[in-house]
Image: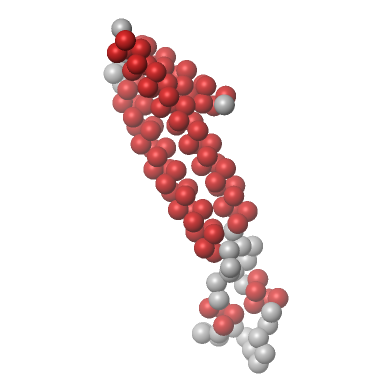
Amino acid sequence: PAGMALSVLVILLLSVLYEAVKMGKAVLLRRALLARPRSLSQEALTEPQEGDSGPTQGSPSLMALPTSFPRWFWFHVGQTLFHVVQVVLGYMVMLAVMSYNAWIFLGAIAGSTLGYFL
């Protein structure tokens, strides 16, 4: 009985963590979209170079990356890590539910409900 109760508690906590990671991923996506530059050629339009007759290969306006690129890239790396954690947790909960134990199933449902509520 104690082992079963502990198993149900662990599955409940894994389900809560799964929902928390899912919400964290959504928050990180929103921040990444806000950090994304509006246009890659924004600096070229606001600050034209002297003597530029048009965009050519090797021109400084085309070679310069926006200053927010590294920040957006790190948000993307964070999203990737959150996705990997979410997939691993999802498969762990799925494998537990596939044991066809009603208490484990109810623990997963309760944890998912609680995680979404929080």
Query: In which quadrant of the rendered view does residue 88 lie?
Result: top left
Q: Is residue 25 left or right of residue 48?
A: left
Q: Is residue 104 visible?
A: no
Q: Is residue 41 above or below residue 84?
A: below
Q: Is residue 65 above or below residue 31?
A: below
Label count reads 0
Q: Which of the two residues, 13 or 109, is positioned nearer the viewer here?
A: 13
Q: Residue furthest bottom?
A: 51
What's the residue at 54%, 27% (across, down)?
A: 116
Query: In which quadrant of the rendered view does residue 71 lie?
Result: bottom right
What percent of the width, then of the height, locates residue 76? Answer: 48, 53
Q: Is residue 35 left or right of residue 17?
A: right
What percent of the width, then of the height, locates residue 66? Answer: 58, 69
What's the residue at 52%, 63% (across, down)?
A: 70
What percent of the width, then of the height, locates residue 58? Answer: 51, 85
Q: Which of the two residues, 58 or 111, is positioned nearer the viewer here?
A: 111
Q: Is residue 13 left or right of residue 55?
A: left
What's the residue at 54%, 64% (across, down)?
A: 69
Q: Is residue 70 left or right of residue 80?
A: right
For the N terminus, which image quadrant? top left
Q: Residue furthest top?
A: 1
Q: Is residue 86 above or below residue 46?
A: above
Q: How is the image coloured?
A: secondary structure
Q: Residue furthest front?
A: 2
For the C terminus, which image quadrant? top right
What percent of the width, then of the height, locates residue 95? Answer: 31, 26
Q: Is residue 13 visible?
A: yes
What's the residue at 53%, 36% (across, down)?
A: 23
